Each structure stands twice: as C-alpha cells, then as structure tokens.
Image (cartoon, rainbow, N blue to C red):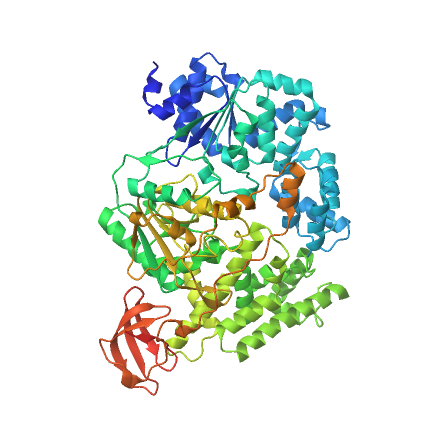
Amino acid sequence: MEQYIEQLNEQQRAAVLYTDGPELVIAGAGSGKTRVLTYKIVHLLYQGYEPWRILALTFTNKAAREMRERIEQLVGTDTAQKLWMGTFHSIFARILRLNATRIGYKSSFTIYDTSDSKSLVKSIVKDMDLDDKVYKPSALLNAISSAKNMLISPERYAELKDVREADRQARRPQTYAIYRAYRDRCFAANAMDFDDLLYYTNLLLRDNPDLLHHYQEYFRYVLVDEYQDTNFAQHVIVSQLCSESHKLCVVGDDAQSIYSFRGANIRNILNLKNSYPELKIFKLEQNYRSTQNIINAANSLIEKNVEQIRKQVFSKNSVGKRIDVVQSYSDFEEGYLVANRISQVKMRTHDSYEEFAILYRTNAQSRVLEESLRKRNIPYRIYGGLSFYQRKEVKDAVAYFRMALNPDDDEALKRIINYPSRGIGETTLNKLMRSAMTRNISIWQAINTLHEENPGLNSGTLKKLDAFASLINEFVELNRKEASADTVAETIINRSQLMAVLMSDRTPESISKRENLSELLNGAKQFVSQRTEEGVTEVSLSDFMAEISLATDQDSDTAGEERITLMTVHAAKGLEFNNVFIVGVEEDLLPSALSQSSAAEIEEERRLLYVALTRARNYCMMSYASSRYRNGMTAICQPSRFLRDISPEYLNLSSGANLGSTPAPSFASYRSSYHSPSSPAQSRTAKYSQPSQPTPAAAPLQQNEVSGAAIHNVTELSEGMRIEHPRFGLGVITVVDTSQPDARIHVDFDNTGKRVLLLKFARFAIK
C-alpha cells in the first residue's frame, strides 16, 4: 500500500479508498477533512485518473490553494497544476468563457464586483424614477442574488405571487422590473456578476444537452468541499455533472451548517441520499484539535438537534479542563471578567496572544469588550471587520457629534454634508471648498455666507445648503443647552436620519449597522450613568467625545504585534485557537432574536454555538450577563437555552450561575415546523418573505432589580462592608467620604476595579 495511505486513520482511509460510486464524507470538527480530500485526489491519480478529468470545488481560494500545495508535495507540480481545482465561481467562470457564445455572451465578458452592481442598480432606480430611499441598492441586490441562487429568472420572479406580495409590503413592488432591467443591462454590457456565474452555468448545461454530456464525460470524478454550505444553484449544477457517472465525493459537516443567510441549504447534504440512493456515507469522528471535555460538551449540545446526520465525535487528546461558564452582573462586568481571565490564562500557559479569541454573535458586542481590553493594555484585532469606532456608520454618527461641538471641522463636514443623501453633490462641495480656501475660512463659514458670496450655486442648491445649515445649527444649539451627552447623541442620530435610512433595509449588513448605531447610543448612556454615579453633575457630549477619541487613537496597533482576535462566530468557522472565550451566550443573542421563528432557525443557532465550542483546542469559557444595555435601556437577560443543552458534567459553573429552565419543545413540534419545499419556487417564496420583527425576551431593568438595591444613607455604611451593584458587581467599601456636601463612597469591586460612587445617585444592595 502506498505510503500516503498509511498516514490516515481507519475512517479516513476507508473514505479515501472508496471509488465505486457516490460518497458523502461527514467530517466532524477537527477530523482532518482537508487531508482526506487531498489524499482522495492523490489516490485517484495513482488509480490512473488523468488530472484534468478531476474536478475539485471549494468555497475559498485559500482552501483550493492549500489543497493544491499539499497535492504538489505528493505528486509534483506538473501533475497538480493540471487539476480542475478552484472555487465554484472560478471554475464556472472558466466553463462559461469557453462556451459563452451558447448563451449569447462574448468570451471576454466582464465580471462585476459588488460596487459595480450597486452602481448599475442605482442608475436603474434613477432611470425608472423610483425613490432611492425606498429602493436601496443593497436590498435590491440581496433580492436579486437570492433569486439567482434559486435559479429564478426575472420572468419567473414576476409570476411568484407570494414574492411579489412580500416586495409590495416592503414598499418595493417594482423589484421584479428592476431585476429584469438589471439582467438586460448586464447582458448588453457583456457583463456578469458573481451570482450570474452560477445562474448561467446552470442555464448553459440545462439548455445544451450536448455540452452537458461533454462535461459529464470529461469530468470523471467530482469532489466538493464544505457541501453543507452549498446553495440550490450549486447543488443543481453538481447534480447535473454527476447524473450519469455518479462519481462524486462530497465532504462536509451538517453540524457546521451556519450560513443560511447567504443562501446555504442544509437540505443539500441531509437529503443527498435522495439524489443518489446508492450513496455511501463515511464518518470522520476522531477530532485531533480539542480536548476530550470540549468535544464531549459539543456533542451533548448538538445531539439536541433533530435534523442531522448522527455521529459521535471523539478525541484521544487529554481530558482537559471543564468549560467555564461565567455569569456577570452586566455586559460591562462581562468585558472585565473576560479581560481578567485572558490575563490569568496567559500567565498560566504562556500562550501567545495569537492563541486567544473572543467570539460573539453580533459585531455590536465588540464595543464593551474593546473598552475592557484597552484598559488592561491587552492588544487586539477585529477579524474580518473594523474596530467599533472605525465602522462607517459609527464614524458617520461621530462626525455629526463633532459638528455639534465644532461646526468648523472641515473633515467632519465633508463626511456628512450629503449623508444621508440630501442632493448636495461633489460639484457643490468642490465649489464650497474652493471658496473657503480662497477666503481662508472654514467650509462651514462659507456655507453661512453664501448669500453674501455665492460661488456659482443655483437657488435649488442654496435651499439644500440652508436646510443642512439649519440642521447643524440645531445640533450646535442643543449641545449648548443640553448637558446630557446621551440625550444630545440620541437626538442627533434621530434628526440626522442616520438610523432611519437603515430601517427599510432588511439585509444582514443593514441590521448590523443599526445594531452598531444603537450600541454607540448605549455607550453614551452608560458613560453618562457611570459619571453621574461618580458625582459628575453635568456630562456633556464633549466629555463623551473625549472618552471615545482615546479609543479611536489606540485602534491603530503596531503592525506585527501579537494580538488576541475578536470576531463573530460566523467568521471563526475554519479557524482554531488554544483559548476561546464565547461571550453573550444569552437568549436573544445566541439564539438571536431574529432567528427564533422556527425549529430550523433554532437548530442553526445551536449549530453556531457548536462551531464556537469546537474552535478551542485547550481552554474554553462561555459567559452571559444578567443585564445588558439594549436599545438605550438596561434589560434583564436570561442565559441561553443552549447552556442547558450541554451536560453539566462538562461544565464548571461560576458561583451564583443559574442556568434556569424552560420547557423543551416536543419532538413532534420540531418535526411539524420543518417543511421541505417541493419546488424551487416554494423555497424561493420562503426566502423572500419578510423577516419577523424580533421579540426580545429581555425586559426593562430597573436599577433595584438587584435584590435590595436602593439609595442608602451614609449612616448605613461603613468601611469593609460588602455591596452588590447592578453594573459593577460585588465589591468592598474602602472609604466613606463625608468631607464634601454630597457624601460618596470608594468601592473596590471584585472584577471591575475601584470606583467612587455618589450616594444620592448610586443604587446598590448591602450584603
């Protein structure tokens, strides 16, 4: 037997050696999936398959590159280079260029990126004289993309009554016409977008039986990576190519199917046997990454899912520590606890910061965590995104705040003068800038003297600039009159329409942006609340801006510095770290409030936590807060139902942690909530239905929700007394200060450090 076969375990070897028909390799987390795919291809080459007749499809260029490099080491560069190996889009683009004329395209067609597509949609909306505040490019492109991934043409789209009704309710009844115009304009420009590469490949194979037969004969073996992430179009194309030979090997893990929002359909892997009755299933169940305890905990979690291909992942690594489950009083304390624990684990293990990751459900959660890490001088990076205060929507809001404090701030003005859109274009701005430079004044001063010195602007533009100036003056005046930073910030975000412009758009990107703006307001409210308790009577917007300017100044870490990683769980898939911290494991966060309308959604959220757990090699901690700032108020939070799904023997609960209990749905209710669409149209209809509004279980929290919390008289207090604060947690009074008109206490909190609290504002319980 060849040497490469000897490097495989029994399960891996069986999957590699089988070549008699279609096979599904269920590869549990950390089970050596890439190795199996690589060695499978090498084995096929040794079996006499010509390299150009092997088609290997991946989702990322990185995965394709890594596989090719491994294969090169085993069979040489010349052979490896002849493989048809790459992403779905790159391979299908290659096929389309070879056969473009069959679908009316030229082989030199352009591939539009997202910005190109947005620009085209914008021009279509303008040409159709539609309201661009309703017909937003991102929402329209999301609808068009979903249709293409379901292989629905513009004509078919127009026939789907439920889809058209959903568009009507979203106040976008002309979406079907925009889709048709977009298709026609792309065709006229000899251009395709990324989704077209799938859509037209299917069209090409469907409408040209001779060509389909050619590729069925040409590709003697097809291999697909991460099959649980395939959408309907990808599944159909693969099925077409393998319908004759059935020489198919797909690798994936249904337990890690977490991308339904991108169109991924778990049914493709769950129901594969329906397409190939002779399908042979191989399970890779040995995990080489994590400790036995982490794997056992993950298994006990995922076994609660009804819809799955059952497997029993195991590890022969050390038993390892139980997973720490930590309760905090608030999201504020949670950040401090995580930062403290990172320092402790690093001190114990001497691991590099690169081996630490903090995972969360939504990007908005990063703000509090970033704050805690900065205060402990722990370097960090935001993976796959920007640090909180570097995100566009946050910078836009901060630019408005800056204008309220200093309207002569040219850079802030340039950023927001036409955002949200108010018809003040680049030409106008350039004229204003030239006028300001000539007169050696700020752009703001130039705007306010337009009626004395007009740099060639028409009356319509002058009216728009007057309206903008009035808005900014309103903010300036509000800041002068109103001491409270949170009130000023909230008014600015509302009056500027920054939040409103995102409200009609239900794309994941817009939802994330709204969450970030809400979190910015949360930050302002928390800042005011904390300063008030500390005895500061007036907390202005300038105070808040001084605080966050420190955050933005420190966001540019030195290149090459070891840093811990902050990321969403979705972004973490495929990665691994020695130490993983999963925060916000609460109802309405994980599972998300937006993903609780069906058993299928709950099961995907459970898979999300499974993915998070299995990123950890040695140490894992999950945390939840008893209260969290949401939508401008403090709310009571409940620990996630998923924590109760994990067998307690694998968990180490912190003192006072109470996971609660909720009745589990019956097996029958799970079953009844699943519906397998009998046709693409039915599935597509579901895709286009409007998401239900979140119904947070979190209730408004009054400060006295901590048992016994109240405002206390100085006579009740003494040094050494322990208290419990709703935000800062448990602590000890170190000083009772009566030397000033307003008495205050100094408290050394267990997890959040030393604080000074003004007694007339501070609510807490005496322990």
The quadrant the N terminus occupies is top left
Residue 194: where, in percent of width, then height? 61, 36
Residue located farthest toward the bottom when viewing the structure as drawn: 741
Residue placed at 33% from the left, 40% from the top?
295
Residue placed at 53% from the left, 30% from the top?
272
Residue placed at 72% from the left, 67% from the top?
462
Q: Quadrant of residue 240?
A: top right
Residue 110: where, in percent of width, then height? 65, 33
* In front of the other: 538 or 13: 13
* In front of the other: 569 or 439: 569
In the displayed structure image, the side of residue 49 where residue 737 appears, left or right: left
Residue 365: where, in percent of width, then height? 44, 57
User: Looking at the image, can residue 730 be seen?
Assistant: yes
Q: Quadrant of residue 531?
A: bottom left
* In front of the other: 322 or 33: 322
User: Looking at the image, can residue 406 be seen?
Assistant: no
Residue placed at 75% from the left, 38% from the top?
155
The quadrant the C terminus occupies is bottom left
